[in-house]
Amino acid sequence: MSKKVLTTPIKDEDLKDIKIGDIIYLTGTLVTCRDVAHRRLIEEKIPLPVDLKGKAIFHAGPIVRDLGNEKYEIVSIGPTTSMRMEKFEKEFIEETGVKLVVGKGGMGKNTEEGCKKHKALHLVFPAGNAVYAATKVEEIKEVHWKDLGMPESLWVCEVKEFGPLIVSIDAEGNNIFEENKVEFNKKKEEQYKLISEQVRFIK
Amino acid sequence: MNVIQDKTQQKERMIELMSKFISIVSYKLPDDVENKLKELSEEEDNRLAKIIYKTMFENQKLASELKRPSCQDTGVLQFFVKCGQHFPLIGQLDNILRESTFKSTKETPLRHNSVETFDEYNTGKNIGNGTPSIFWEIEEDSDKVEIYTYMAGGGCTLPGVATVLMPGEGYEGVVKFVLDRMTSYGLNACPPLLVGVGVGTSVETAALNSKLALMRPVGSVNENENAAKMEKLLEDGINAIGLGPQGLKGSKSVMGVNVVNTARHPSTIGVAVNTGCWSHRRGKITFDSNLNYEISTHKGVTL
């Protein structure tokens, strides 16, 4: 199977045949965007200083080395828990036209709806692999909202074959984590019954 | 006068060593975790899980070669200290650990992870009011100090939870409390997890126990027979759920379950869960009174 690479700007039709559980790679513009940036755009109504149409965001707070003269280098970069952005993501996709939302773990109903209606994907980069990810970042082109501190600033990164990115929500709104959860919860109940009989230490 | 100068020099020396140690913990996993991850990956046959494990090992190799934090979230630093009453820098230790964190943050570099609450600004120094967190234990008749360094990232801190059960709910209630957390928050906390379970009398004793449980090596066993039994039952049970790496399914879910327990009030069972992610960056260093050190978690590593 050949490597599936998406290049920004991404169009609706590029996402048509991509399904949950597929692995893709990204070339182009990836902007770090997490808790406070989402809150600013959606709740505080402050416009984002970067145009995200057709591009990708990364729920991530990197470690960045300041090289002076507004030059920066990514030391380590990896995803943070996407679920924290769930309450904002549907509107975020709607307002920005962002096509790929990269993060960690699953997202919920809102994001499913946003992905389905506006044709976008949620993707998981295997978390904790921050040096591996950093080697796929070619340069930091810009940085915005530095007042939020290193993890929360918007770092505009140019990436090459950034991945593996595992499709967790596809453009039809299918959600791999929600499907898995049904199975996990069923197994959990079975295990609870099995274990609880064996830990009746209070007699 | 000489004594004071000695102490200043000793302090500088210890900051130098500790900041280097913190840096090492950020880019190299302890031996027990490395070995367990290898073992788990070899037992895995799920397609996505295998790709994720492969990425993990490549990442750790790169991090170690480039001496860069293997995960970008280098956490709020936590130190668990067991200090001998005669350790010469006992009174300076809090400051030493704070300054070591700051120094290591600049030099490694580590991420700035201290946001002052209510004022809501990042200090930009990775230290703040009450951070790093330092937990103390004093040891009688000893002149050594044992320090566990732990990088508690946001992802694996988020599942942390504590409650007080009624004795009528029994240890069955403890099991339910732990299992429920695994399928809700646990799967987002970067499994395979090390699960720390604390049992005690109240929320804070249980919570501290659950974090101390994460300092215990992977594969270690509680010395109480019943607690050890519950560790094994929970480990097998959570594994049977099959969270897999990143919660995307796999043959296992955890590196292990460690229980730390203390006595309780007759009317209460305090219980807490803390999780360590697969990138469980914990290190133990012991200094003697002359600041000779020994690192027991990372074999062959020198500062």
Image (cartoon, coloured by chain):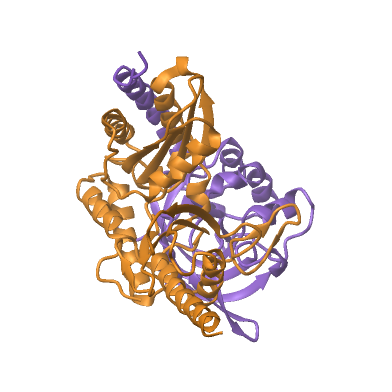
Which residue is farthest right?
A45
User: Which chain, by letter, is purple?
Assistant: A
Name above or below for residue B82 compared with residue A85. below
**Residue A136, visible in the rendered structure:** no
Residue at 33% of width from left, 39% of height from top? B257
The answer to which of B76 and A51 lies nearer the viewer is B76
Quarter occupied by the C terminus of chain B: bottom left
Name above or below for residue B287 compared with residue B53. below
**Residue B298, visible in the rendered structure:** yes
Q: How many numbered circles does the render carry?
A: 0
Residue at 66% of width from left, 59% of height from top? B129
Would you identify the image quadrant in which residue B23 lies? bottom left
Residue B164 image point, x, y percent: 53, 27
Residue A154 image point, x, y percent: 64, 65
- On screen, residue A35 versus residue A73, left or right, reads right
The answer to which of B225 and B169 lies nearer the viewer is B225
Q: Colour of chain B?
A: orange
Would you identify the image quadrant in which residue B91 lies? bottom right
- On screen, residue B32 versus residue B154, left or right, reads left
